[in-house]
Amino acid sequence: MTTATSSLQDALQDAHARYAAANPKSLAQHRNAAKVLPGGNTRTVLFSDPFPVCVSAAEGCYVHSLDGDVYADYLGEYTAGLFGHSEPAIKEAVQRALDSGWVRGGHIPQEAELASLICERFPSIERVRFANSGTEANLYAIQTARAVSGKNKVVVFEGGYHGGVFVFSGAKSPITAPFDFIIAPYNDWAGTLALLEADKRDIACVLIEAHQGSGGCIPATPAFLKHIEAWANEHEALFILDEVMTSRLSGGGLQEVYGLKPDMTTLGKYIGGGFSFGAFGGRADIMERYNPLRPNYIGHAGTFNNNVFTMYAGVAGYGKVFTPEVAKALTAKGESLRKRLNKIARTAAFPMQFTGLGSMMNVHMCPGEITSTRDHSRSNPLLRDLFYFDMLEQGIWPARRGMLNLSLPMGQKEFDQLADAVSHFVETRRDLQI
Ligand SMILES: *Cc1c(COP(=O)(O)O)cnc(C)c1O
């Protein structure tokens, strides 16, 4: 442990050294992987400097490292891990899929069952189509809007995230999909309206997260969302709600909570029971364009759109385990945990707060209200990194960027463990020179 009055840089250096010493097998694995994967990595968000801990197994709401440590899984696979790692109903369904054969190359009953579940819970989704990821779902939703409207521009928001080629926070990415994007300020209606009006004849759709997940767990105000919805309706631009993460916050997602009726919704993450999943759906008149019985229908291919494992696991997990009642209960647990953590954070010697909604939250090392990524750009990145390494040492598995997500197998024991770890961080780092 560093001395009480060390500088933040020293403390972080020290944390790195202890981390490296504690995870020699992960380091060896990383070096091996780097021979064939750039930086030993095939999914950027999982990388952690100086090298990532390698996960060798997982069970319930715990992950096991190659180095023999067990962590309470507060990453929750960035919300795709809602069911934890070994939900029996999903296991049983996947076993049935194994027993009845996969890669069948035909329609299967479970695809209509999963679609029915989604359409029941989301009244705005009258028809739905499946894809393999949230990225794909958003790509198809955007292209559907452009095809249906005959218009070109796509409005997204600062700090927004809609998949690997739709990143609108941080530095501009050279692999962003080549659409004509208008990037509007989140939670700033006057600023957004000015941009919308400037291009009003050519806007195909407005795509938004009602709670920015990747952007740092920042809820949009209901008023902001209503303004956007009304403007889109008035100007015949499609209002697309990305509920890839937020669908978990109630039986019918944030659109149910806020009384929104998007033209299209995109889904992903946990709905496939932990298997690759994406979906886009919405108004029947829009989605029926994909009906192959219609003349001039739009084709939508994808070898794994009705992937047997995803469909079986989705019906079991989303249908039987994650009922609307369970969704509501999990959101309540998250709300109370976030309050508890914020109470601890207020006792810290440095600015620290947890933002979010329900079972998703993010730590930020800055004071004041956070309504956009602009607000938390003041967050101290070194202190947040130190938080990450300190959490690992306390047996907590968070996202490097400070995101924490609940999963269904979690209970009081895990909530206490996180609260204790955060208290420990606040206490042991009290005299840090920042
Ligand atoms: C994760 C995510 C996506 C992309 O989903 P993938 O399955 O990772 O491609 C899109 N939108 C939001 C809001 C997400 O959180």
Image (spheres, helix red, strand yellow):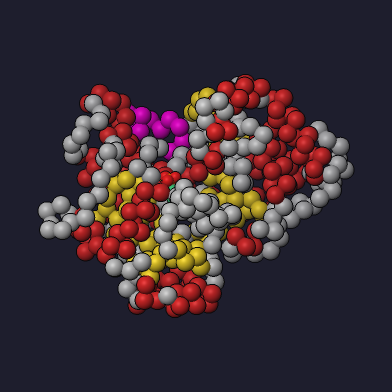
Is residue 402 something that shows in the picture? yes
Nearer the observer, 402 or 338: 402
Front-most of residues 91 and 163 = 163
Residue 90 within the segment the image draws in magenta: yes
**Image quarter of residue 73:** top right
Does residue 325 show up? no
Q: Residue at x 32, y 37 (%)?
A: 310
Query: Which residue occupies 28% across, 62% down?
Result: 147
Q: Where is residue 137 drawn, in percent x and y?
A: 35, 51
Dividing the image into 4 quarters, which one contains the N terminus? top right
Q: Is residue 79 above or below residue 372?
A: above
Reply yes or no: does residue 239 show up in magenta: no
Is 359 on the left-hand or right-hand side of 299? right
The residue stretch that appears in magenta: 83-92
258 relative position to 51: left or right = left
Q: What residue is rendered at 80% in x and 43% in y?
A: 9
Q: Position of residue 106 (x, y in %)?
A: 18, 36
Q: Position of residue 100 (x, y in %)?
A: 22, 26
State which quadrant residue 185 falls in.
Answer: bottom right
Q: Is residue 236 left or right of residue 58?
A: left
Q: Where 185 falls versus 235 (above or below)? A: above
Q: Position of residue 262 (x, y in %)?
A: 35, 64
